Amino acid sequence: MARTAIPGGLSARRAWRSATLADRRPETAQAVTLVLDVPDWPGHVPGQHVDVRLTSEDGYRATRSYSVAAPTDGDALELTVQRVPDGEVSTFLCDDLRRGDTVEVRGPLGGWFVWRPGQPGPVLLVAGGSGVVPLMSMLRARPAGSASPFRLVYSARSPEDLLYREELARRAAENDGVEVGLVFTRSAPEGDRRGVGRLRPEDLTGHGWSVDDAPTCYVCGPTGFVESAAAHLVALGHPPERIRTERFGPSGP
C-alpha cells in the first residue's frame, strides 16, 4: 500500500509558527481542549503531535510536546492539555491562556504512530489516561460507514477523569463500527461489574479484537501502562510488528 506523505515539507514542519487561541473547551476538572488558529498550517495525520513553546517577558523559554486531538482541516489546530502537578507549561495552558493570546507551535511531528483514513483492516486503540488524545484523533478521522472497524479500550482513574466522555458515548451508541470499552483503576461507576484495577489481558480480549482478526494495535499512555499493555497483546498472540506504541505523561491512570 502506498504511504501518504506526512503533511508539510521538512523545513515547514521544523519552523515555529504563531498560534492564536480561538476557543477553549473544558474536558475534565484537570484538562482542557485548546483550539488554535495557525496561519498556513500544513495539516496533519491522526496520531501526530506538535511542540508548543512559551516565552516569558524576560526571554525564558519552555517547550512541551502535545498530541493533536482532532483531524482539523484548514488553519485550526486542536490540542487537549491535561494539567500536570507543578507543570509550568500545562498549568499556564490550562489556567492562564486566554482567547486572543498567542503561543508558538512547531510540527506536525511523528510518522510512525499514525493512522491514515483508508488504511485497511480493523483497528484496536488502547489508551491510558491522557494517552487517549492521539487515539481520539484517529477515531475522529474515521469516515462514517468506513470498512475499518475501531475498538477503543480506555483506562482511566475514574469516570470523572474520562476525556471526551460524551462524544465517546455518542459514537459507541451510533453503532457505526466503533466500540468503546472502559476500564477504571481507582473508582468505578455504581454497577460496574469489572470493578477497579489496572488493565488486564481479559480487558483486551473482552473489548478488543482476537488475534485472528489481525488488527493494527495502537497503544498510548504513560510508560508503565504502555509496556504492560503491549506485553499483554504480545502474550495474547498479536504480532509485535502490528503493535505501535507511544509513551508520554508523568503518571499512570
Image (cartoon, grey):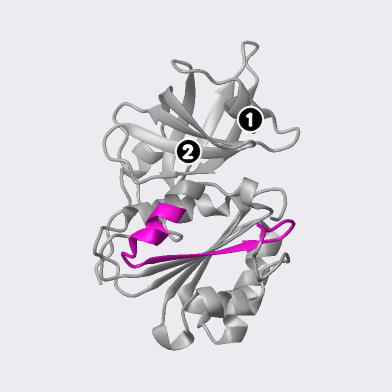
Q: Is residue 44 above or below residue 96?
A: below
Place of residue 48 in the rendered image (x, y in percent of width and height, measured from the top left): 43, 50
Which one is nearer the viewer's eye here, 124 or 169?
Answer: 169
Are circles 2 and 1 on residues that touch, CB within 8 Å? no
Q: Residue at x 33, y 75 (%)?
A: 121
- In primary-sequence order, the first of circles 2 and 1 is 2
Place of residue 111 in the rendered image (x, y in percent of width and height, measured from the top left): 41, 56
Give the CA separation, mark 2 to mark 1: 13 Å
Q: Residue at x 55, y 80 (%)?
A: 205
Q: Residue at x 41, y 28 (%)?
A: 36
Residue type, label 1? Val
Residue 187 part of the magenta-drawn span? yes
Q: Can you identify the residue that label 1 sits on?
A: 89
Q: Tag on residue 245? A: none
Q: Can you identify the residue that label 2 sits on?
A: 79
- Element marked by disc 2: strand
Place of residue 200 in the rendered image (x, y in percent of width and height, measured from the top left): 67, 74
Residue type, label 2? Leu
Place of residue 197 in the rendered image (x, y in percent of width and height, measured from the top left): 73, 66
Q: Which residues are magenta?
A: 169-190
